[in-house]
Amino acid sequence: MDFFKQLKILLLCVQYIYSLVTFVVNNRKLFLDNAELYTINTSNSHNLHLPLPHLAKFQKGVHYTGIRLYNLLPTSIKKKASKTEVFKKTFKKFLMENSFYYVEEFINFRE
């Protein structure tokens, strides 16, 4: 694990997470914010709206999984999503500092 950090190499699992989340950020206009759908300002208003899945195949797809992983990011990183390059650098640094071996580790991570 220390070798990956020293060499600044992302683990395969982390590359998968990075690719999905950057897809969501790069194609931001395809997704709705919770703030756009609901008039009440809540702590989840900065999250993206997660559509109801009707098929398991949709749940495993890029759109659904990308939104789900994006919503799990710390708020400080999500706030930088409007500036793509700044977001990518910040997100990559976050992933390097917290080497995740499994997607479940990322899902269960809390700061």
Image (cartoon, rainbow, N blue to C red):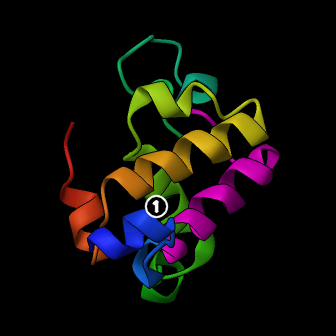
Work out whether residue 105 or residue 42 is closer to the camera in this orientation and state it: 105
Dot 1 lies on which element?
loop
Number of numbered discs on residues: 1
Q: Where's residue 1, x and y in %?
A: 27, 74
Q: Is residue 82 above or below residue 73?
A: above
Q: Where's residue 30, x and y in %?
A: 77, 52
Q: Is residue 23 above or below residue 72?
A: below
Confirm whether residue 70 shows in the render.
yes
Q: Where's residue 5, x and y in %?
A: 39, 64
Q: Is residue 88 above or below residue 36?
A: below
Work out whether residue 61 or residue 3 is closer to the camera in this orientation and state it: 3
Q: Which residue is mark 1?
A: 52
Say which quarter of the image contains residue 102. bottom left
Q: Name the residue at the bottom extreme.
A: 57
Taking the image as shown, residue 90 lies to the left or right of residue 84, namely left
Q: Which residues are magenta?
A: 15-33
Work out whether residue 15 or residue 10 is closer to the camera in this orientation and state it: 10
- What type of secondary structure mainly makes up the magenta span? helix
